[in-house]
Image (cartoon, rainbow, N blue to C red):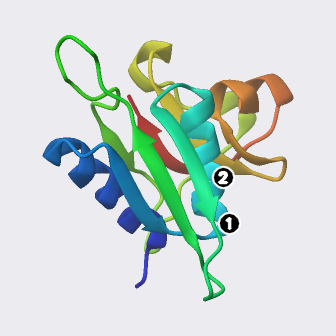
Amino acid sequence: MTDPIADYLTRLRNALKAGHRVLDIPASNIKKEITKVLHEKGYILNYKFEAEKNYQGNIKIALKYNLETKKPAIFHLERVSKPGLRKYVKADTMPRVLNGLGVAIISTSKGVITDKEARDMNVGGEVLCYVY
């Protein structure tokens, strides 16, 4: 697999479209950090890291839906930086997703954080994905 982050986002997107409640994804450190950010911002209900007999383990994600309309909390997931074309931004040119209503997940020297946190810390990095 050449792009594990794109695979992670695609599995998440497909599970939301299919209406699944729980999703299992093979774990990696970057996927764990993206999952933590999604949980902190309220896009997923809960998550759990499961260590298996193999060294990789799993991430079990409980997806979040609106109770009345049954629509998912995540409407759009978009991979920005790809293996063939990386997108790096400086702190002063940090992207705003939906004029601040969405979240850009950035991989910085301070860890995987959102665009707003990166602006506050005055750090740049690689734009992993947009979520709204």
Q: Say if mark 1 contacts mark 2, CB within 8 Å.
A: yes
Q: In screen coordinates, is 52 left or right of 109?
A: left
**Residue pictured at 68% horizontal, 66% vertical:** 29
Rendering coords of residue 128 (x, y %): 53, 52
Quarter of the picture holding the C terminus:
top left
Quarter of the picture holding the N terminus:
bottom left
**Residue pictured at 31% horizontal, 43% vertical:** 21
Question: Which type of secondary structure does the marked residue at label 2 adopt?
Answer: helix
Task: Establish if 65 lies above or below 27.
Answer: above
Q: In screen coordinates, is 113 left or right of 78?
A: right
- Alpha carbon separation for disc pair 1 and 2: 6 Å
Amino acid at pointer 2: Glu
**Residue pictured at 19% horizontal, 22% vertical:** 70
Amino acid at pointer 1: Asn
Task: Establish if 19 lies above or below 88.
Answer: above
Dot 2: within a 10 Å radius of its alpha carbon, few (fewer than 14), some, or many (20 or more) residues?
A: some
Q: Would you name the residue on which mark 1 appears?
A: 29
One can see residue 126 in this view: no
In this rendered view, identify the residue nearer to me: 112 or 88. 112
Q: Would you name the residue on which mark 2 appears?
A: 33
Residue most toward the top?
A: 68
One can see residue 121 in this view: yes
Rendering coords of residue 43 (x, y %): 46, 30
Dot 1: within a 10 Å radius of its alpha carbon, few (fewer than 14), some, or many (20 or more) residues?
A: few
Rendering coords of residue 62 (x, y %): 43, 42
Residue most toward the front?
A: 53
**Residue pictured at 64% horizontal, 43% vertical:** 36
Q: Which quadrant of the structure image shows residue 68?
A: top left
Rendering coords of residue 81 (x, y %): 48, 58
In this rendered view, identify the residue nearer to me: 35 or 92. 35
